[in-house]
Amino acid sequence: MANSLATRLAAALLVACLATAARADDETPQPSPSPSVQAPGGQNPSGQNPAGQNPSGQKGRAGRGGEAGSGANAAASGSTAEQHRLPPDSTTRQSVALPGRTLNFSATAGSIHVFDDKGEPLADIAYTSYQLDGAEKANRPVTFLFNGGPGSASAWLQFGNVGPWRLPFDGAVSSAAPELLANADTWLDFTDLVFIDPVGTGYSRFVTTSEEARKRFFTVDGDANSVALVIRRWLEKYDRLTSPKYLVGESYGGIRGPKVVRNLQMQQGVGVRGLVLISPVLDFREYTGSSLLQYVASLPTMAAVARQAKGPVTREDLADVESYARGDFLLDLVKGQADTEATARLADKVANLTGIDQAVSRRLAGRFDIGEFRREFDRKNGKVTGRYDASVEGFDPYPDSSYFRFNDPSGDPLMAPLTSAAVDLTTRKLNWRPDGSYHLLSESVNKAWEFGHGISPAESVTQLRQALALDPNVKLLIGHGLFDLATPYFASKIILDQLPAFAGPSRTRLAVYPGGHMFYSRDGSRQAFRKEVEALMR
């Protein structure tokens, strides 16, 4: 009995150490204590994650079963992880020739070692950084970037959008050559870049043998705490604490980003100048359950998909749909199906806007789940739309099935070339060769993620408001794609419209472009968004 009690107390203490006193060190733990990394204000947003499902509105392959052995970094035993620590950092000199200029920079592939307050190792968290030669560190911005998932490595942002080398995403297929090209649209011109792979993604891995401590990393707040800690330690390691600092998060990064900013402000002693969110989810309450706003948020995107089939579409072309969505559409939704006249009116209008068969729309009372729209939009031809980019279509592998059995033609083809490109660059050009597998999108991490339990699904609007209220210099830029059904742009528009006057248009901006979840795969959208980011940082 006594031994059992002692064991439980020791496990509980280790979890508390991760939440309140985790430390990260370059090589060995230091004896001095570090600031607490507990979530500010005791905030503990929660939600529910049914087994085998991704909540809508995040990067991940919703509706797919797990793969045996997937995400081995997260599932490996503690003893195995201890034997496979990540190797020492590798820094190389690099150069890319771009139109009108040549960029010379140092590239580092390495990791930050995270310890508890007793110096016991918890995890090795990998990063890739690019620092321009000859820049004055004190005035040179540095930007930290992470993708979402949860369970996604940062390769999407690094090789699709921001880094010095880019893998073309448009029209990619699984068998495409993973050839990286010099990226004329890299942000390295105006900011140094640090791409972070949270534990269980990329090459990042656990070292601790404590299952309780490992689980803590896969919680909403535990994840944000660890990422904030890694950012602070990178700044210390490279003498960049005085540099202007920015954060970029994609998809689930919309939950992670504001929480990391708030943690940096209050727990790590690090101020942030700006937050850039790409295709973010900010509040899971609007994507699940009986919330009527999920239909309001997705309707403009569904209409955009229908209109783009007839020609190019911009957000300005959707002004009538946005007005209807937050006006008569919402009023008729609130009246409910008990009002048959309102329901018929709503269903017929939705059919007209989306191109869905009127009979189908009436059967569904004009309330289209994302999966239902994706299948019904071009069902007559046996095709489904993408979730990441609904303007992309692919064949339904089971067109006669009575339930959904399709994947994402706009996202899945990128998995193989992007993984191969990331591994090739890291091991060959950057000369960093960890053992074990690289995980671009770990399904085991996603399934293990603890969104919480109870009546308060995960959201980051609380931390966003707090961060903007605390520091009047902090700015927010949100970018979305018109055809993204994973995180529809209108959901962010609704949330931004609710912010107080102190977070008005001079500090917060929503930019919407043709494209999907990775709208930056389109040249025009990527270039336009780059200009927005550069203006934010200049």
Image (cartoon, grey):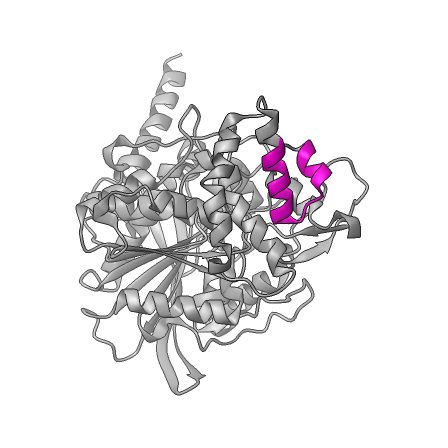
**In the image, is residue 359 part of the stretch drawn in magenta?**
yes
Q: Residue at x 79, y 39 (%)?
A: 401
Single out the residue that lies furthest toward the front. 341
Q: Along the horizontal axis of the image, is 389 left or right of 112?
A: right
**In the image, is residue 350 part of the stretch drawn in magenta?**
yes
Residue situated in front as seen by the camera: 72 or 130: 130
Q: Along the horizontal axis of the image, is 336 left or right of 130?
A: right
Q: Is residue 247 depicted above or below 18 in this figure?
A: below
Q: Position of residue 196 (x, y in %)?
A: 40, 56
Quadrant in the picture for residue 163? bottom left
Residue situated in front as seen by the camera: 502 or 357: 357
The reply to whether residue 389 is in sight is no
Q: Position of residue 496 (x, y in %)?
A: 34, 46
Residue situated in front as seen by the camera: 464 or 412: 464
Quadrant where the N terminus is found in the figure: top left
Q: Is residue 161 depicted above or below 264 in this figure?
A: below
Q: Position of residue 480 (x, y in %)?
A: 45, 56
Quadrant where the C terminus is found in the figure: bottom left
Q: Position of residue 422 (x, y in %)?
A: 53, 64
Q: Residue at x 26, y 53 (%)?
A: 232
Q: Residue at x 22, y 46 (%)?
A: 501
The reply to whether residue 99 is in sight is yes
Q: Main secondary structure of the magenta part?
A: helix
Q: What is the total number of numbered labels drawn onto the structure image? A: 0
The magenta stretch is 344-363
